[in-house]
Amino acid sequence: MSSFRTKMNYQLKNSSRRRKNPAFAFLGIGFVIILIAWLIFSPNSLSLAVSKIISPFWNIDKAASGSLSTKASLEKENARLQQKIEELAPSDARIQELTQENLELKELLGRTAIKDGVLAAVVKKPPFSPYDTLIIDAGTAEGIAAGDMAYALGNIPIGKVEEVRVNSAKISLYSNPGLKYEVSIGPKNIMATATARGGGAYEVTLPRDAMIQVGDPVTMPSVYSSVFGTVSTVIAVPARAFATILFNSPVNANELRWVIIQHSGIETF
């Protein structure tokens, strides 16, 4: 019982001490009043304080927003440039085509020995024209007539004009199957009759001792001694007295873009 009383007396003494020292309460109330007045009459200070508190978070958000904006801008610019490249592609292809045509024409006209000839573009060729034929964009308006000779790569004979219209003509290639021509083969200029097999290929039969070799030239003596082909295969069987010589035209008709037509009207074959 005495301890209880002692405890109660201690609490009463402490309570009386707090009541006897009101300075702390007045000090706290005064601090609060000053803080409120400062915040009310100094809004700039409040803004500064708030700004300092939230600025780290604001800068992070702003940086993220700026990054997204930059990425979107780059993607937009990349799309614009890609579209520009696609728009310029046809022009670039056309420039390259014209450049190639210019080089081909310079080379063609620089080495041709054909006089009074007409330069014509090949507008149709196999497989879009009949087998072993070409369609060109020149005709009677340019003085071309049936029987005129056609040359490729300047001076290589490839065929004759078969049909003519005002602004076009059809050329029958010499390699049309079954057609025959007089040719000269090898360094000794052995005369022979070549039979066309189609697709620029020809066949000749000669004595086995003619000593014809792969790579020997084949010419048409009556046409400015122009190269008509090159020996590609020699088939010689010991038991036979004759050998079969195969040769090909140096011109691939499927790749031709230009021909020269000699419209002299002189029949060669």
Image (cartoon, rainbow, N blue to C red):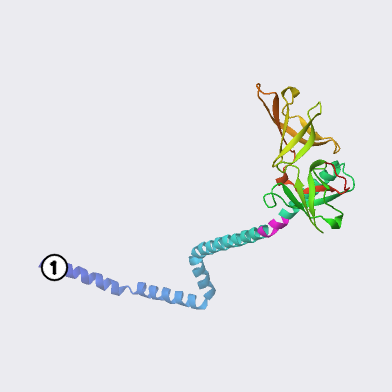
Horizontal side, residue 103 vs residue 244: left or right = right
> Which residue is depicted at the point 35% across and 74% down?
25
Q: Which residue is mark 1?
A: 4
Mark 1 crowdedness (10 Å alpha carbons): few <14, some 14-19, many ≥20: few
Q: Which portion, as a residue range, is magenta?
A: 86-92
Of 44 and 35, which appears nearest the observer?
A: 44
> Which residue is depicted at the point 86% across and 55% down?
142
> What percent of the width, then of the height, locates residue 15?
25, 72
Where is the C terminus found, in terms of image quarters? top right
> What percent of the width, then of the height, locates residue 90?
70, 57
Q: Main secondary structure of the magenta part?
A: helix
Where is the N terminus found, in terms of image quarters? bottom left
Horizontal side, residue 249 vs residue 42: left or right = right
Callout 1: SS: helix
Of 203 and 34, which appears nearest the observer?
A: 203
Is residue 258 found inside the magenta-colored segment of the image? no
Horizontal side, residue 63 vs residue 89: left or right = left
> What percent of the width, then of the height, locates residue 152?
79, 44
Amino acid type assigned to the residue bearing label 1 in the image: Phe
